[in-house]
Amino acid sequence: MNNGSAFRAFTDEAGQFLAGLKVVDYYAEPLPSAVDERIHAIVARFMTGTAVERTAFQDSLAPEQRSLFGIYGHRAATLAARQNKRDWLLSGLVGAVIANYIIPPKRNVEVSLAVFYHCAQKIGEPTTTLFAEAAYYAQPELANKLTAFGQRTDFNLKHFGWQEQKTPEGVRYKFSW
């Protein structure tokens, strides 16, 4: 099977897996979960595709499936902060790229990006590097937003409506607007 066929098979398999998930159920799962691991693997495979393959993958997703990547992104960022692991943070940010492939008219993407910026600072990862790397996988409008956000010097998590909370399991992030 050539790479194009393999990526199409991956896209179909990922779509079948995602079709069986509901956002509300995934959001309520313990952290980490088997679903986190599976979506982490999907994002890793997505990142190996060509630009054409990545576009085809994103075009194949229903809005509900893209929403799962948004939930995954913040769960992965939380895991990155708890475990001090860049891999989870980049994977989560690329998950946010997938979730925001089509940006709804009233969505403020910066609000969702704030958690990634904060977690990058927390684990000592340069935000400019992390966001530029994720921008490589994004459509042009979002790539520009990612690059600009990663270069911010006036960042404050609370200004974007987020709170970091300490729990027995580790930190978690709660949106409070």
Image: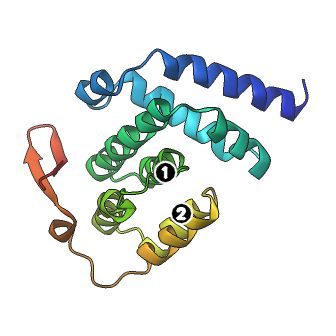
Q: Quadrant of residue 112?
A: bottom left
Front-most of residues 159 and 150? 159
Examine the rendered structure and indicate whether residue 77 appears above or below residue 119. above
Disc number for residue 100: 1
Q: Quadrant of residue 164?
A: bottom left
* Picture coordinates of residue 64, whole percent (x, y): 44, 30
Q: CA distance from mark 1 to mark 2?
A: 8 Å
- Give whichever of discs 1 and 2 has the lower sequence position: 1
Query: Which residue appears at 48% of the width and 53% of the height?
Result: 103
* Picture coordinates of residue 4, whole percent (x, y): 85, 34
Q: Is residue 6 left or right of residue 127?
A: right
Front-most of residues 87 and 133? 133
Tell me the amino acid under the disc marked 2: Leu
Tell me the amino acid under the disc marked 1: Asn
Tell me the crowding category of disc 1: few under 14, some 14 to 19, or many 20 or more residues within 10 angstroms, Cα based: many
Query: Which residue appears at 30% of the width and 61% of the height?
Result: 111
Query: Which residue appears at 63% of the width and 56% of the height?
Result: 137
Q: Which residue is disc 2 drawn over?
A: 142
Label 2 near label 1: C-beta < 8 Å? yes
Count up the numbered dots: 2
SS at badge 1: loop
Residue 30 can be seen, yes or no? no
Tell me the crowding category of disc 2: few under 14, some 14 to 19, or many 20 or more residues within 10 angstroms, Cα based: many
